[in-house]
Image (cartoon, rainbow, N blue to C red):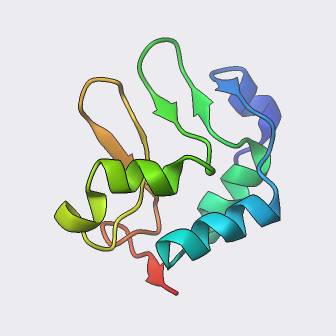
Amino acid sequence: MLNRAYLSQHFELRIPATSSQINVAEAKVGLSFSKEYVDFLQITNGLSSMGCLALHEIEILPERNIEYEVPRYLPGCFMIGDDSGGQAGSEPGTAAHGIRRS
């Protein structure tokens, strides 16, 4: 089970996301995030590692998904981060992993 103490040993964490921030993001993209992703956001609103992995803050993700044309090229997916080298990661509950449309 993920927890803040474990994650902070390996990653740079941010303050937890609020329920309001999560609800606003879900409404903007018309998706319901998985319980696991919501649990993660309530531990840390994104994280980064030394130079490669970044899971972005929930507030910027709806716009970032539009900029990257995720709905066009990966319908039903929701990009949550990237490796700064062209590889993106999607929310574990998305179409690639089973996300539900609201």
Rendered residue at 80%/64% (across/down): 19
Q: Where residue 30 appears, x then y in whole percent? A: 49, 78
Left or right: 75, with 59 as reference point: left
Picture coordinates of residue 89, whole percent (x, y): 37, 46
Q: Is residue 62 above or below residue 64?
A: below
Residue depicted at 41% across the width and 61% down the height: 78
For the point 79% across and 65% down, which residue is it?
20
Is 45 or 27 nearer to us in this picture? Answer: 27
Q: Residue at x 73, y 41 (%)?
A: 44
- Would residue 68 be visible to someone looking at this image? yes
Q: Is residue 78 left or right of residue 73?
A: right
Seen from the viewer's position, the closer of residues 29 and 91 is 29
Q: Quadrant of residue 34?
A: bottom right
Specify whether 13 is left or right of 31.
right
Residue that sits furthest to the left in the current view: 73
Image check: 33 left or right of 78? right
Measured from the top left, where is residue 97 in percent x and y? 37, 68
Q: Which residue of the protein is positioned furthest toward the top in this rendering?
A: 50
Tell me which corner region of the image, top left, top right, bottom left or bottom right, holds residue 96: bottom left
